[in-house]
Amino acid sequence: MILAFVAAQMVHFCAVIALHTRFAAEQFRLDDPHLAVIMVGFSIVMGAGITASSRTQSKIVRTRHVVLLYRLWLIFAIDYAKHPVKQFRLVAVVVVLALLLRHIPRRRFENDGVILGS
């Protein structure tokens, strides 16, 4: 699932590059801060993809992977919180709730020695 997300993000990056270079009505320029943000975002997405596909994952790789995924979702939450269309700002609420609900302890039920809800 994560590799599909990373692939979709790569298509998104390529489409944005094409729109701003090939199909732009005027000359497109990137300032250093914009370029830094793009490179950091690209690196986080690629890092999440690379750590997701590791065959033998050490604890360090798993931790790095989780940190990268949380950074991605926090970037989405921050971006949607400032969205110009007010209805899309609700997406930020959903993302933050999903991140918080992930850490609520789950109840474990036992049924004839079989543990359910793991």
Image (cartoon, rainbow, N blue to C red):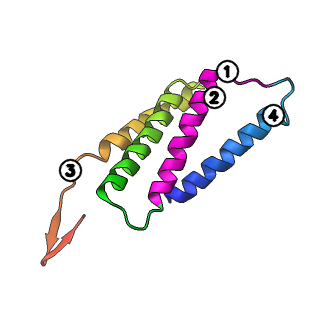
Residue 35 numbered tag: 2
Q: Position of residue 79 (x, y in %)?
A: 53, 29
Helix, strand or loop for disc 4: helix
Residue 11 numbered tag: none
Task: Work out whether mark 4 precedes mark 2 in sequence or the reverse, and give the earlier one.
Answer: 4
* Label 3 – label 2 distance at C-alpha: 40 Å
Taking depth in this image into account, of 79 and 110 the one nearest to the observer is 79
* Residue plotted at (43% across, 39% down): 71
* Residue plotted at (71% across, 44% down): 14
Confirm whether the magenta stretch covers residue 29.
Answer: yes
* Residue plotted at (83% across, 30% down): 24
The kind of residue on which mark 4 rests is Thr
Q: As displayed, is residue 87 above or below residue 101?
A: above
Q: Count residues near mark 4 (Cα–Cα under 10 Å), then give few for <14, some for 14-19, many for 20+.
A: some
Q: Position of residue 111 (x, y in %)?
A: 15, 74
Magenta-tinted stretch:
28-52
The mark lying in front, picked from 4 and 2, is 2
Helix, strand or loop for disc 3: loop
* Label 3 – label 4 distance at C-alpha: 48 Å
Residue 31 numbered tag: 1
